[in-house]
Image (cartoon, grey):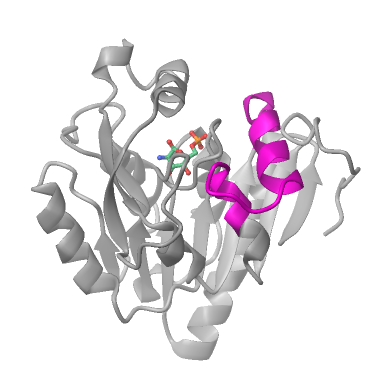
Amino acid sequence: MKLIVKDNTADLGKEAGRQAAQIIRAAIKNNGFANIILATGTSQFEVLKQLTQEDVDWKQVTMFHLDEYIGLPESSPASFRKYLKERFIQKAEGLKQIHLINGENNPAKECLRLNEIIRDIRIDVALLGIGENGHLGFNDPPADFETEEAFIVVNLDEKCRRQQLGEGWFRQIDDVPRQAITMSVKQIMKSKQIICSVPDSRKAQAVKDCFENPVSNWFPGSILQEHPHCICFLDKLSSALLEKNLHDQL
Ligand code: GLP
């Protein structure tokens, strides 16, 4: 894993979006198509903005969705299906295939449906973020590092739910769902390349916990240390607690 520190969120998003586009273009050139995983959340705003401005033949790209709340309708402002439709799908016109997680379906059946779809798919790049509690997708601590299932039902912890409230997606804590469907840690780690984007001072402690400690499911994002082709983009604020100065090493 490589850590890169950019000056601010905008620069971070631009670089992450450009890198992702390069990987997608290379996959299309080599294989004729590309398979990608997209996270949501505030950390992806600038990344997706840049990615959708890039010159990519979206007709050759299949998109998988990282995580979604259980029981939340798409009409909710916090729906990640709504987020991806507005911030990516409508802009990356003509995508080859789109595999959204429908959190309103029976959760166990929805996981089985998605597991079947992704079983033989090789993912070229996953765009990820890390939560304030260090979560990867919605794999809150202590995350299940062992399950072989691609998509799983998880309970959301208090810190995770508070983050969603703090970011303004919900009006009150009781509105934040208690469960979600998320891609599992093992499935995420199968991606050939990973671009992780972690801006903001809110993430400084999680960044330190995940990248300066040994790998532990109490800091789920720490597993990225073991990925052979992962770049994690930080900004000055999110990297503030790190011991080493890692500014702009790309
Ligand atoms: C969010 C999303 C994930 C995201 C992570 C970090 O809540 N469920 O897809 O990668 O948790 O979120 P954020 O970017 O809002 O910090």
Using the rendered view, name the quadrant where residue 114 is placed: bottom left
In reply to whether residue 23 is colored magenta, the answer given is no
**Residue 223 percent location from the top left of the image:** 59, 56
Horizontal relation, residue 182 to residue 48: left or right: left
Span colored in magenta: 199-223
Quadrant that contains the N terminus: bottom right
Which residue is found at the position 80% from the left and 37% from the top? 7
**Residue 146 percent location from the top left of the image:** 42, 62
Horizontal relation, residue 137 to residue 43: left or right: left
In reply to whether residue 221 is colored magenta, the answer given is yes
Q: Main secondary structure of the magenta part?
A: helix
For this rendering, which residue is in front, 44 or 182?
A: 182
Using the rendered view, name the quadrant where residue 210 is placed: top right
Horizontal relation, residue 228 to residue 72: left or right: right
Which residue is found at the position 64% from the left and 35% from the top? 206
Decide if residue 56 is in sight here: yes
Decide if residue 11 is in sight here: no
Which residue is found at the position 32% from the left and 66% from the top? 95
Taking the view exactly as shown, the residue that stands out farthest to the top is 172
Q: Looking at the image, is 158 positioned above or below residue 226?
A: above
